[in-house]
Amino acid sequence: MPKLFFIFLILLNVSFLYGKGVEIKVLLINNKWLKAELLKADQEGNLTIQLNNAERILRRKDFRLVKMTMPSDIQKAKKLFKQNKINEAGKLLDSVADKYKFPPINLKIKVLQAQVKIAGDDYKAAQTILEALLKEKILMPQAEGLSYAHAFLLLGNVYEKLEQDDNAKKAYRCSFEVAVPEYSAMANLLLGKILLKQDDTQGALDCFLENISIFSPEVPGRKESLQKTIAIYKKNRLLRNADFAREF
């Protein structure tokens, strides 16, 4: 079965898994989010959505990502995690992990399981979860890209905790390349910080400048990237002035 057909065969079965439709948020090309109800998708990746009580076709070229509403038990686990009830959240996730086979939701569960392990300082377990899920191919880029960007960011965090900076750099760069603003800019910022620590000032500056040029001011990691850039330029100017003074 051709891969593209397989991808959207899954999407076409959304109504079977969720009912009449699925509440979604779509990241448009202009980086604005659109709320709607997903009814179906065709083999070209175009979505049929319910918006303002009317059906509308959203062309694949007009959007980048799709976020889907999570089932109630996954939402409950996420709420427990935010309340710092780590053990309860972990047990609930373990009990429902095999219940959901739809790829975007399965990925969300694994990412949340990794977050639970990280919160419990079990970095090796988090590493195992994240490395396993990131070896899998993205079947639905529009719906799974968000989880992959988050997972690569978390894996970079884990590698840093395990003092594996070279692996962390690769993971952060992968998160950045998925190009999901809420995770990718932060990943690129953290990559820049590692490069600074390794005295690769130009590499770090490149990361910070990428964030400044690509992402809007409210995106996490963008503001600090600007601050880091200014600090590098100030430091280099002071060094140049000091070198100039020594010559005379």
Image: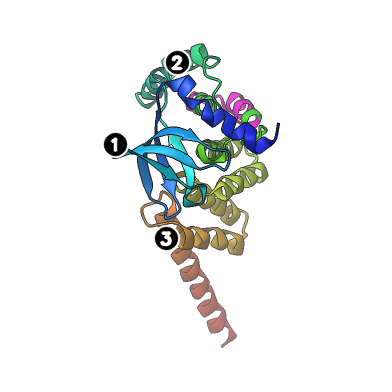
Q: Is residue 120 above or below residue 92?
A: below
Kindly report which numbered mark, 3 or 1, lies closer to the viewer in this rendering: 1
Q: How packed is label 2: few (under 14 Cα within 10 Å), some, or many (20 or more)?
A: some
Location of the N terminus by quadrant is: top right
Q: Residue furthest right?
A: 1
Which residue corresponds to the image point at 48% horizontal and 17% vertical from the top-left?
93
Kindly report which numbered mark, 2 or 1, lies closer to the viewer in this rendering: 1
* Disc sitting over residue 53 in the figure: 1
Does residue 28 appear anywhere in the picture?
yes
Report the span colored magenta: 116-131
Describe the element under mark 2 as helix, strand or loop: helix
Residue 94 image offset from top left, x and y in percent: 52, 14
Q: Nearer the viewer, residue 224 or 149?
A: 149
Location of the C terminus by quadrant is: bottom right
Q: Earlier in the sequence, mark 2 or mark 3?
A: 2
* Disc sitting over residue 227 in the figure: 3
Residue 8 image offset from top left, x and y in percent: 57, 34
Q: What residue type is labelled 3?
A: Gln
Q: Nearer the viewer, residue 25 or 133?
A: 25
Quote the CA–CA distance across marks 3 and 1.
Answer: 45 Å
Quote the CA–CA distance across marks 2 and 1.
Answer: 42 Å
